[in-house]
Image: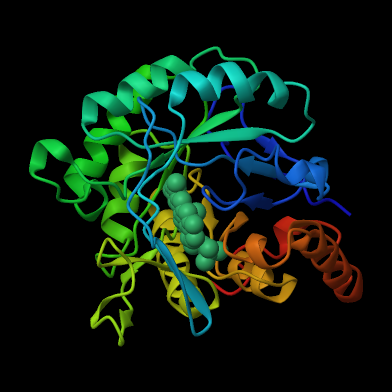
Amino acid sequence: MNLQIELAPQHKSGLLLKNPVITASGTFGYGIEYAKIAEVQRLGAVICKGTTLHSRAGNAQPRTQETSSGMLNAIGLQNPGIHIVIDKYAPMWETWQTPVIVNIAGETVKEFGQLAQLLEGVPGVAGIEVNVSCPNIQEGGAVFGANPHTVAQVTAAVRRSTTLPLIVKLSPNSGDARPTALAAAEAGADAVSLINTVTAMSIDIHARRPALANGTGGLSGPAVKPIALRMVYEVAKELRASHPHVPVIGLGGISTAHDALEFLMAGASAIQLGTINFVNPHAGVEIIEGIEEFMRQEGISDISEIIGAAL
Ligand SMILES: Cc1cc2nc3c(=O)[nH]c(=O)nc-3n(C[C@H](O)[C@H](O)[C@H](O)COP(=O)(O)O)c2cc1C
């Protein structure tokens, strides 16, 4: 059975994964922590926590909250900064069979370009995922990801600064991700991933105030799956017609092989696992095995027979 997936068909060296199961940014640390308990080398790829130019302590506590069938978070991009990621983690990733993609977040368009430039030629870094769901400081804190024009600017700045495969991660919060997906594809993204978290909130009724210190947070987990699936389906359909060599990576609430197969059939070439990693660190391997089992049962020899089957 062939589960291999080419994530960057337009890129000169490509980004070939042994299977389509990737762990999502912010939910799998740097892979290194999970490597002690899970079979990280069997994953298609790992995406590390969002990385900024300088270290960040993140938002005040509380910054996570369980909700019915999901979780809210407002971590605020806590991370040690790009230099530590390059010096401390990349040398370990270089020894792995599983490629590691670095997720980056800037406060300005220029900063996104700088982050990409710093990753250029670093052994152990297989690609870049750009998180456009962060506040654009130059534009008074509006989110980059909501506006196709700013998504194009960020994508173009990163594209100019890197020869690495480039994935642009889209926000669901405009309601329709097709305009931002098209903007990213036109500005040089090798692939797009969606969805990031859905802006949401929870109230502490005893304190009579929002449960998260930040007020609002991002909703993830099973609660967002049907929304994510609809958005992936729409974007895959759109890109198939206009940019057939720009794959879509689907995520949002995937917890089982059944969920993963739905996203693949909706047109995702690969999937990412987020919140489920907190519940079950072995979910990645179990989902790979579940996809293989489905393919065996259905007499499918190549994963490409499934991708976009429901479009
Ligand atoms: C605690 C937490 C931290 C996250 N941090 C990041 C991040 O740093 N960068 C990013 O692009 N997405 C981040 N995300 C979003 C996830 O990668 C993913 O897009 C989202 O959770 C939806 O997938 P899921 O429902 O499978 O979790 C984070 C999500 C959670 C729950």
Relative horizontal placement of residue 73, taking residue 45 as reference (left or right)? left
Residue 1, percent from left and from top = 89, 54
Above or below — where is 37 with respect to 297?
A: above
Q: Residue drawn at (69%, 52%), measured in percent from left and top?
A: 20
Q: Please indicate whether residue 164 sits to the left or right of residue 105 in the image.
A: right
Residue 294 x, y percent position in the rendering: 83, 72
Q: Which residue is drawn at 36% across and 45% down?
A: 58
Q: How is the image coloured?
A: rainbow
Is residue 90 found left or right of 71 in the rendered image?
right
**Residue 121 rendering spot, x and y as whole percentages:** 55, 12
Depth check: give the residue in front, 26 or 254.
26
Residue nearest the observer in this picture, 245 or 78 = 78
Asked which quadrant contains residue 105, the reply is: top left
In the image, residue 81 sits, relative to residue 252, either above or below, namely: above
Q: Position of residue 303 (x, y in %)?
A: 75, 58
Q: Nearer the viewer, residue 33 or 139?
A: 33
Q: How many marks?
A: 0
